[in-house]
Structures are given as C-alpha cells and as structure tokens.
Image (cartoon, coloured by chain):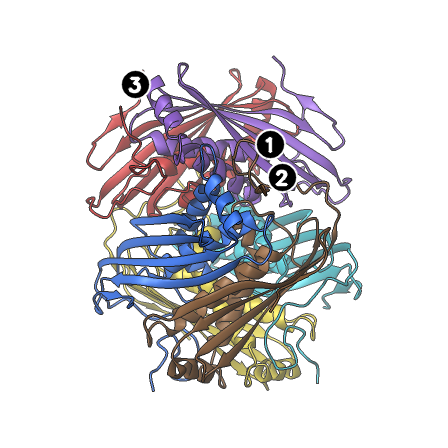
Chain colours: A cyan, B yellow, C red, D purple, E blue, F brown
Amino acid sequence: MAELTHLDDEGRARMVDVGAKAVTDRRAVARATVRMAPTTAAAVRDGNAPKGDVIAVARIAGIQAAKRTSELIPLCHGLPLSFVDVVAEVDVEAGIVTLTTDARTSAQTGVEMEALTAASVAALTVYDMVKGIEKGVEIAEVVLLEKSGGRSGTWRRGG
Amino acid sequence: MAELTHLDDEGRARMVDVGAKAVTDRRAVARATVRMAPTTAAAVRDGNAPKGDVIAVARIAGIQAAKRTSELIPLCHGLPLSFVDVVAEVDVEAGIVTLTTDARTSAQTGVEMEALTAASVAALTVYDMVKGIEKGVEIAEVVLLEKSGGRSGTWRRGG
Amino acid sequence: MAELTHLDDEGRARMVDVGAKAVTDRRAVARATVRMAPTTAAAVRDGNAPKGDVIAVARIAGIQAAKRTSELIPLCHGLPLSFVDVVAEVDVEAGIVTLTTDARTSAQTGVEMEALTAASVAALTVYDMVKGIEKGVEIAEVVLLEKSGGRSGTWRRGG
Amino acid sequence: MAELTHLDDEGRARMVDVGAKAVTDRRAVARATVRMAPTTAAAVRDGNAPKGDVIAVARIAGIQAAKRTSELIPLCHGLPLSFVDVVAEVDVEAGIVTLTTDARTSAQTGVEMEALTAASVAALTVYDMVKGIEKGVEIAEVVLLEKSGGRSGTWRRGG
Amino acid sequence: MAELTHLDDEGRARMVDVGAKAVTDRRAVARATVRMAPTTAAAVRDGNAPKGDVIAVARIAGIQAAKRTSELIPLCHGLPLSFVDVVAEVDVEAGIVTLTTDARTSAQTGVEMEALTAASVAALTVYDMVKGIEKGVEIAEVVLLEKSGGRSGTWRRGG
Amino acid sequence: MAELTHLDDEGRARMVDVGAKAVTDRRAVARATVRMAPTTAAAVRDGNAPKGDVIAVARIAGIQAAKRTSELIPLCHGLPLSFVDVVAEVDVEAGIVTLTTDARTSAQTGVEMEALTAASVAALTVYDMVKGIEKGVEIAEVVLLEKSGGRSGTWRRGG
C-alpha cells in the first residue's frame, strides 16, 4: 500500500527531508469557490465598485497567508516565494465567487500548499465580509489546478 | 439591497465596531470535508493507528489556526477563545475525511470565523499529508453548522 | 526629573503593571503623512480608481498591524481591539498621502501605540507601492492626534 | 505616466514576480527621527546609562521587526537577512533621538522595506517608552538614506 | 490513575474548556538557569556594563515570548497579560546566569506557561549570545517557583 | 578575554553579519529532558496509546517552534530549514520524558538555536499537558548534543 511520506516507519508524523532535492523553479495554481445567493454575489461585485474594497481585502489576505503557510501547516517547509497572486471572479447569477491563486518559487520543495492556503484564506475572507448579509454561505471547493517543477514534472487537474 | 457590514458608506472595507455589543457566551461549529481515494483514506486511518500522528497533526494545526484567526482574516477582531476542538472522522469506503470544529468564547463578537478557520487549516493539513500518495485530493466543503450567542441567537444549518 | 515609566529603579526596561487600572473605553487617533512628487501622488490616486487597490492595500496593512502591536513593541500589552480604521487622503498637488487611524478598545491600558503602529505600517505600505516609480519618498510625520479614556482623560494635539 | 509596479493592467495590487531577477548582494540604510523635549531626551540618554535599557529595547525591536517585514507589508517578498542593525543617537539639546538602520541580504529583491520597517518600529518603541513623561512626541521622519545592489545600482539620498 | 486534563475520553489531545471558570487575578513566577564557564559568565556580566546589551536582549526576548505563549504551546489559551518581567542575575564564580520571570493576568486560566515560556526563551537568548565563545553551555533547569490565583490557590516550590 | 560575537565594540547587541560565510550543509541535534513522577510519566506513555496524542502534540509544537526560531531569539538569522524532527522517549520508572531534536539546513549560518528551540518548546508542551496532574514538574536540561557544518566543523557533547 502507498505510504504517507509524512510518517516515519513507526507512524510518527515528520517533515520530509528535502535537503537532497534539487533547487528548481516551482509553480502551483489553486482555486477556491464560495457559493452564496445571487443578491449577495451582487453586493460583492458592487463592493468591488469605485472605492469598494471587498475583493481587494480577500486578495491581500490570500497573498499574506501564502507567505505564512509554513506557520499554519505543521510539516510544511518555509520557503521564499518569488510571486503570489490571487485573482477573484464574481458570477452574480450563479452566486459564485471564485478565487484563483498562483504561487511561485525556486526551491527544493513545491508551492502547492502555498497556493491552496492562499485560496482558502481568500475564500474565508470573502465569507467574513458577506456573513452579515447571508447566513450559510459555503466554501464549496478548494482544489489544486496545476503544479509544475521538481522531479514529478507538471500535473494538471483533469476534466 | 442588503449592505455589507464590512463596507462604510463609500464602499471602503472596515472592521465593524463591536464596542457597544454585549459580552455573551458565543459558540460556533464548522465542518470541512476532504475527498480522496479509498486507499488514501485507508492510509490516513492507518496513520491513525498506534503511534500514527496523521489525525493528531491535523487537529493540532486546526486548534492553533483558530487562535490566529484575526491575523489571517483582515477585518476579524482578536478575541480570547475559551475552547477550541477539532474532531476528525475517516470514512474509508467513501474516501472522505471530515473535520468538525467547535470554538467558544465569551466576547462582544462571535467565533464563526475561528471555527471555519480551524476547519480549513485542519483540512489543508490532511491534504498536505496525503499529497505524496495521491494527486488531486479535494477539499470539498467548508461550512458553518451552528452558531449561537449574541443578538441574533442560534442558527443551525438546514438539511 | 521625570522618570520613564518603562524603567524600574535600576533602569531596567519593564512592562508597566496595568493589573490595578480600571477597564475603561479607550480611543486613539493618529496620523502619518507620506511626501512624494505630485505625479507619484497622482498615480496613487489613480491606483485608487475602479479596481485599483493602492489605498486598499495600505488600509488593510494598517488594520492588521494594529492587531499585532504588542508583538512589535516589546513592552506593549496585548489587548483586544473593538475597532480599528485607517482613512487615506491623497493631495495630488501637494504630493501628500495622509493616513489617519482610529483605534478603540475597552481595557486597562490605552491604544495609542495601536493607532500609531497602524499609521506607520500603512505609510510604509504606501511607500512600498510607489518606490518603483520614485526614489526618496519620505514618511514625513507620524503623530498622535487624540487620545481618550483612562485616568488621564482626553488629550488633543495642539495647533 | 509612470506606472505603479505593484498594480497589474487592471489596477489590481500584486506582488512583483522576482523569479527572473539575479541574486545579488543588497543593502539598505534608513533613518527615523523622534522629536521630544530636551528633558525627555535626557531621560532617554540616562535610560541608556548602566543597566538602563531604553535604547537597547528600541534596537532589539527594530531588528526583530526587520525580520518580519514581509508579514507587515502585504506585497513584500520574504527574504533571509544576513545582517540587520539599528544604531541610536540622542541629541539632548535638540531633543532628537535618531535611529539609523542597516539591512543586508543576498537575494533577488532589495531590503529597502526591511531597513525602513526597522527604523519605524525602533522609533515607535522609543515613543512608547517616553509617552509616560511627555505627550505629543513626534516621529518626525522616516527616510531611506542609501540603497545598493540589484539592477538599479547604488542610490544615495541627496542634501 | 490520574488523568491528563488535555486528553478526552478517547485519548485525543484537546484544549481544556475554561468558559465556566471564574476570572481571578493570576500570577506565576518561574526560573531558568544557564550553566557556563566562569570566564563566559564574566563576559555576560561585562556585556551588561555601560552600553552592553546582553542581559537586556535576553530580558526583552523573554517578555516578548510570554506574550506569544499560546502560539507556541498548542493547547494553551490566549490571554491578555497585565504584567511580565524577567530579572537576570549573573554568578560569575559559579558560572550561572539565572533568569527569573513573573507573569500576571486577570483571567479564567493561569499564567504558568507564560512564566515558563519567558524563562525558556530568555535562557535560549543568553545561550545564543555566548555560543560564539563557549561550546556546550547548558540550560540546566526551567522550573515553576510559585503560582497563585484560581481555584487551586497558591503553590510554592519546596526546598 | 573572549569577546561576545553578538556585541559590537561598544557593547551593543547586534546580529552577526553572515553575508560572507559559505553556504554549507548544517545540522544540529539537541535534547531536553522533563522530570516527573513515575505515575505521571506512565500517563504520558498511556497518552501515547492508540488515539492518544500527548507525544504527538509535543513533537508538532517543537517542529513548529523550530521554524519560528528567528522570531523568538532576537539576534538569530531567519533561514529555511530542510528538515526538523523531534523524537520523544518516555522512561516511566525514572519519571523522565526525553525530547531529542534534529534540525538541518543548507545556509550561511548554523541551526543550533533551531534544534534547541524545538527541544525547549516540545518540553514546555509536555509540561503543559501534565501540569494538571502533577505540580512541580521540572525541565531538567536543554543541551546541544551535536553540531556540524560551517567553518568550525563537527562538535559532539562529551561524556
């Protein structure tokens, strides 16, 4: 059976030792979606009008969280990110806010967790800002879309 | 139209002033689900066998993240939590790991974001530990289940 | 001669013990100004146009820094803020961006350092965003404008 | 017109991608000045006498803040500093405490924000320690004095 | 057999729920000792001469660490400290630096971990500063000396 | 007399400038011991039984603390760790829990403080979890066992 790389022979959690891995350019793209009523999505979009900061706050929160990933995820390695971005799209009719994140580095380990952490925290921030007008909003998905660099090459989400 | 409480009259993001709110006992329960192949879920369950730390790491990560919610979510107020817990369940056949979180305080504002942040970070930590054996694992949902305390009383997720 | 409250009898730095102070509503207002060329100030203002995030980033940075004041200023007490805000104004002709901050709590000690920290970090964030187009931009002032609550009552900056 | 490097084509704030930049030795020197009454400045100087810690606290606060710059300034890259220092000078007659900071690294991006953040937080820490004996003390200036390394070479503040 | 309060019925780690505990004044005093060669202890003492910052750095590090205890110790509750202090003594002949810490709050839970964390980090900081002149320096002890407040009353270390 | 590398010519604390040091593989191993009654040690061991998390929590706390060493120890350089581990052993009869840590990096400076910080925080976490059943538990020792890499080569603790 497949063995969890984060467990040693006795099942104890551990960091993976990346000291022998090559430094290569790494990139990961992730996405989170937040599902709400169309009227709430409209308020988010309007909050994105002149001087409106809704999406900006979510984007900044995601970027800052990416930089702190190794503080949040216990077995993650710290690494210096060369780039992080969070793009937000609002589909008012469908009642969906989508947060797509992009993280890059040149390091011995990948940035998959950084991209996913940015997406999660950006989504939580959108939730925080709409919870006053709608209860029960849902973070409907947090997924990796693409990952490249390192020994395992490029992976893209199917379908 | 409903107005976002986190925007001022000109649409600028802001913290809500909770200075005039009553201090009451607050509680929130949230849930995140992580979807993976049954064989991966079996490894998580086995990682939970004697000396296995998989679930323990996720639980600790969630508890610690709850305490740092106001650092992650820009417009959240800091508050002293009296209790946080993260319970994990593994459904091997369905390939689902469920993280249910419970946050409590006595404060002027609620702990909804704390419970959701704990669930999100616990789910990300599960993802981090299984990503070496399965690509494309999905955080399928992060939702509030229940919320009580404060002026708006108790809310429970329907269905 | 006046004695520094943060030094004990032997001159050693210390936290002031606030345990015997009354819990009262506290508020502080501070201001930072950033001086730059009018063309740079115009770019900041335009960066504040639809979808432009310059001012939003500075405001969020200030709000988040206020919440972490006690981590940055060694002898500051941690306290739960009930409100923090950062308002930015751009005077293009004068080449001045002004960041005015407002911090509030109900606690045994004041929020002067929180308001000043928010102003400083918001100003540094403006600097960070314009440094690519103008070298030598200057944070020209960080001052307290007003402070109320606690034994010493209300203070307002003169002239 | 000059364009802000921290905004994308649609005006959204972003981190600059430094992945393609060369790793070079980088250095930045910054200065903050704190203006107070001569008697207050004398207390700071005396607080610097045997066993007095005033200046030491400010220096340590500045060094520690430099290391956390990327947590405070949203679009800053994290980088490992090889050196940070904060030198304090007290001019009693003029009522001025000057904090001069020096930050160094070998990285793909500069350390200007690290030097300025160290200066700002050291100045705020001086303020915190004198606010009990004088109201209205002013951080009168936070500026970059010198910057070297990277494509744009060496810059020194005029006049 | 005595049961660990931090484990639930199934042995899972958890935070203790302090929501029903009374808010009382709490205090804890702890001590760490660092053992080194007398010549090294002399350098520490001399580093404590005019302008010397060795002890000051250790004291500040301890105070700051106390404020972050709940970030370091996973099941600790965050609480606002009303006072923290670190007193250092150097016994040159015995080659011992002693760090005694005092933490106070008014809260639903005690400050034992805060006092011990301050002592540990102050001791590590002394170690950091002497490691360049002596290898093998030892943190010889970190203990609680006294604890008061809360249901269990006052406890003092024997002998 | 030996001079403290963390003090400049005037005795002011400073970071050592590591900019000219070579990047080499670095490793450090440290150990902390916690002394308690045998019955308490038995509870820790049993807390390590199926689903029991005592040791897991201490290990995770140590790993996470290692990554934040430069935030805790003022003059430490931040560096990206390639590996950290904490191994715990319980000697019930002797009433001793031993935490052995291993930190590795490839950098311009060593990881001695990271290994010691991990050991200290893991020990404090064990203390936190047993303090409810035994007062007066003692962290009896925090020491470096081994250090390698860099100019000074390999050092091993005698005896």
Q: Residue at x 68, y 70 (%)?
A: B136
Using the image, name the chain to which the residue with label 1 belongs.
D
Label 2 with label 3: CB-CB less than 8 Å:
no
Residue type at tag 2: Phe
Left or right of C13, for residue A105: right
Residue type at tag 3: Gly
Q: Which of pointers 2 and 1 lies earlier in the amino acid sequence?
A: 2
Label 2 with label 1: CB-CB less than 8 Å:
yes
Image quadrant where residue D127 sits: top left
In this view, C30 is above or below A20: above
Q: Residue at x 46, y 43 (%)?
A: E45
- Structural crowding at the residue carrying mark 3, measured as other residues with C-alpha within 10 Å and reported as few (<14), some (14–19) or many (≥20): few
Q: Secondary structure at mark 3?
A: loop
Q: Which residue is mark 2?
A: D83
Left or right of D100, for residue B80: left
**Could you tell me residue F158's position as x and y percent?**
62, 66
Residue B12 visible: yes
Left or right of B88, for residue E27: left
In this view, F114 is above or below F51: above
Quarter of the image for the N terminus of chain C: give it. Answer: top left
Quarter of the image for the C terminus of chain C: give it. Answer: top left
Q: Residue at x 51, y 55 (%)?
A: E36
Left or right of C131, for residue D47: left
Using the image, name the chain to which the residue with label 2 belongs.
D
- How far separated are the C-alphas under marks 2 and 3? 41 Å
**Could you tell me residue B145's position as x and y percent?**
40, 70
Q: Where residue D102 is drawn, which disc sits there?
A: 1
Pick whichever, C140 or B94, lies toward us. C140
Using the image, name the chain to which the residue with label 3 belongs.
C
Image quadrant where residue C141 sits: top left
**Could you tell me residue A36's position as x and y percent?**
48, 59
Q: Which residue is mark 3?
A: C158
